[in-house]
Amino acid sequence: MKHFARTLVAAAARNAACRLSPATGTSAFVRPCARAVRPLGVQTTAAIRGLSTSAPLRANGAADSDLSHTLSEEITYETTQAAEEGEPEFIQAFTNKTGFKLKTKTGEQRVVMTKQFGSETIKVEFDVSEILNIDDPIADISVYRENDQGEAVKEAEKKSEDTPDDFPIVFTATITKPGAPVLFLELESEEGEIGINHMRLLSEEQADTACLESDWARQKTYCGPIFGQLSDDLKENVDAFLAERSIDTALTLFMQDFIEHKEQGEYLNWLKKFKAFIDA
């Protein structure tokens, strides 16, 4: 009991030592109370550092430097290749022969070719994205299957030379002349041959390929007969009509070559823009 009383007295003394001084408003006996009176919700700088689990902020990612270096190497290689090859001669040769004039811009996929044929204005349009139709080159592949005895048996072979060099291109040709509806052809080339998907006769407004509203209006018009079901004489005459206006095999081969040429330039431009983004 005396021990219990002494304990109460000691506790009272400690509490008194921690009371605030009326004169100063501060603790009369500071040290015993120093660790006990830290306000809740307030953390020291050391405590904040110790509790922080987020990664430090960076101006750039850890992989940015390597990516920028790789892009620089690729840009140097592509620039050197382009300088060595120079401006291809096939472009000038084709335009001189056919009278077509090319119009395209760096950074845009659309290519427009125009020419005059008597009183007619002929416009051919295609996209660089048509190169996506090309089959990816493959190495020699042997295909095996397992027979009933669990043995691997060669089933087929695929040779890299089986991959075709060309690729199909979907394009349009617009032929206009005074006092007549516009002949609008939706075409597709493959292996040098041109297939006619649709032959529409439109107003000038409907034939405007740069206008989305015209595209919608164009889709509502009669698309023309199925070309393959026309009489042989009519098909031959239509083919001759187009060939006389340089819409022929030579055009399809030129489009393939030009798409590959322009795609290389667009790739180099893309590399430069990508590197500028990474380095910013």
Image (tube, rainbow, N blue to C red):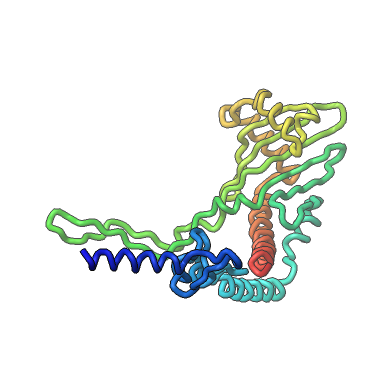
Q: Quadrant of residue 2?
A: bottom left
Q: Residue at x 55, y 50 (%)?
A: 133
Q: Residue at x 87, y 30 (%)?
A: 178
| Image coordinates for residue 11, horizontal then vertical, percent | 35, 65
Residue in the foreground of this view, choosing between 93 and 241:
93
Left of 119 or right of it: where is 78?
left
Residue in the foreground of this view, choosing between 216 and 61:
61
| Image coordinates for residue 16, horizontal then vertical, percent | 44, 66
Left of 61 or right of it: where is 264?
right
| Image coordinates for residue 253, horizontal then vertical, percent | 65, 54
Left of 67 or right of it: where is 102?
right
Q: Which residue is drawn at 71% across and 49% down?
A: 110
User: Quick one: which residue is furthest to the front in this view?
Assistant: 2
Residue 177 lies, with reference to residue 31, above or below; the image says above
User: Quick one: which residue is furthest to the left in this view?
Assistant: 149
Residue in the foreground of this view, choosing between 226 and 72:
72
Q: Residue at x 79, y 50 (%)?
A: 100
Query: The N terminus is located in which quarter?
Result: bottom left
